[in-house]
């Protein structure tokens, strides 16, 4: 190390480099979106807890998805909002690394939960007579716990490999949070091993799960086309459409962000993609499930009806 290098103890998050008037507008807009995200996912969680009709495997996994979305957005968005209205936009290095770790862990958990949800739909439509036996509460608990445990253990690898690196600057991250590719640019050592693990993670956590989801829905589509009645086909499609919308938004934005060449997107475009991934997806998920799901809408009407009658 040269004598002119200093170790990084805190970094500046440059965020969205716009004029101050636009920063206050973005603060108001993103605060609204964040509030809607918390409210929407909170309502989904509340309905699943309060309505016994939603105590099924499908909604059990949906409750996990809501918890992940709240955690995922809350890891990044509050600091971004604070930086939009603050002159001091620094973050200590240890919280920065923790933000990176949690971002990756929650993203990986959501990938696996979406795969489990597609398997649940596959069993429900392709093996309805054996659904209760296959998707028992024990199996559901094991699948959910394994998704969380595997994701956090897998991302410990990223954490260990990051912490082994010497970080000596620059002291700025051109992003609104400590995104892993931006953090690696602070290292004053070769990061080839980190890059290999990131590519491996994309294959294992994005491509692999997406392939399983598509396989599940190919089998589901084949089963639906064999249903004779149009009403039966419509009901089967409606149970899957919400999940397919969420899968498309999540995996689509993730693949564009992490599996296309970095040179194909400007840094501002990567920030917008990360914002969509971190805030808009978690905000849209409960809207998709509530607007397209008759059971969720029915549970909401039931709860609101009870409150009015009191």
Image (cartoon, rainbow, N blue to C red):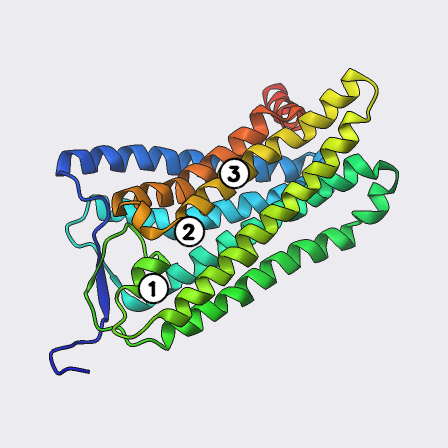
Measure how far apart labels 1 and 2 are at the Cα level.
23 Å
Q: Nearer the viewer, mark 1 or mark 2?
A: 2
Q: Quadrant of the N terminus?
A: bottom left
Q: Earlier in the sequence, mark 1 or mark 2?
A: 1
Disc 2 crowd rating (10 Å Cα; few below 14, some 14-19, many 20+) is: some
Q: Outermost residue, right direction? A: 129
Can you identify the residue that label 3 sits on? 41
Q: Earlier in the sequence, mark 2 or mark 3?
A: 3
Disc 1 crowd rating (10 Å Cα; few below 14, some 14-19, many 20+) is: few
Q: Earlier in the sequence, mark 1 or mark 3?
A: 3
x and y, in percent, of residue 40 in the image: 50, 34
- In this image, 177 relative to 234: left or right? left
Can you identify the residue that label 1 sits on? 95
Is residue 55 among the parts visible in the rendering? Answer: no
x and y, in percent, of residue 60 in the image: 67, 44
Q: Quadrant of the C terminus?
A: top right
Q: Outermost residue, top direction? A: 230
- In this image, 36 relative to 245: left or right? left
The residue under the point 71% across, 45% down is 119
Q: From what the image shows, is residue 52 above or below residue 231?
A: below
């Amino acid at each position: 190390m040269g004598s002119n290098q200093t170790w990084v103890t805190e970094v500046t998050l440059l965020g969205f480099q716009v004029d101050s008037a636009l920063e206050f507008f973005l603060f108001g807009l993103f605060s609204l979106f964040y509030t809607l995200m918390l409210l929407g996912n909170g309502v989904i969680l509340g309905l699943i807890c309060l309505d016994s009709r939603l105590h099924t495997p499908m909604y059990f996994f949906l409750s996990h998805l809501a918890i992940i979305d709240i955690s995922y957005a809350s890891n990044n968005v509050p600091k971004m909002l604070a930086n939009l209205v603050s002159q001091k936009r620094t973050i200590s290095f240890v919280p920065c690394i923790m933000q990176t770790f949690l971002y990756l862990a929650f993203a990986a958990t959501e990938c696996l939960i979406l795969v489990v949800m597609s398997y649940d739909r596959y069993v429900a439509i392709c093996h309805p007579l054996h659904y209760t036996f296959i998707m028992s509460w024990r199996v559901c608990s094991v699948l959910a716990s394994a998704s969380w445990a595997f994701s956090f253990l897998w991302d410990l690898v990223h954490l260990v490999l990051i912490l082994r690196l010497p970080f000596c600057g620059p002291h700025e991250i051109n992003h609104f949070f400590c995104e892993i590719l931006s953090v690696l640019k602070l290292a004053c050592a070769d990061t080839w091993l980190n890059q290999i693990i990131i590519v491996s993670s994309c294959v294992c956590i994005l491509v692999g799960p997406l392939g399983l989801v598509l396989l599940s829905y190919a089998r589901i589509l084949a089963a639906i086309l064999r249903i004779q009645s149009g009403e039966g086909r419509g009901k089967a499609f409606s149970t899957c459409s919400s999940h397919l919308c969420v899968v498309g938004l999540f995996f689509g934005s993730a693949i564009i962000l992490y599996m296309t060449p970095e040179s194909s997107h400007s840094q501002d475009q990567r920030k917008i993609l990360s914002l969509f991934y971190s805030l808009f997806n978690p905000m849209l998920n409960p809207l998709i499930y509530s607007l397209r799901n008759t059971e969720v809408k029915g549970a909401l009407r039931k709860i609101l009806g009870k409150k009015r009658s009191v």
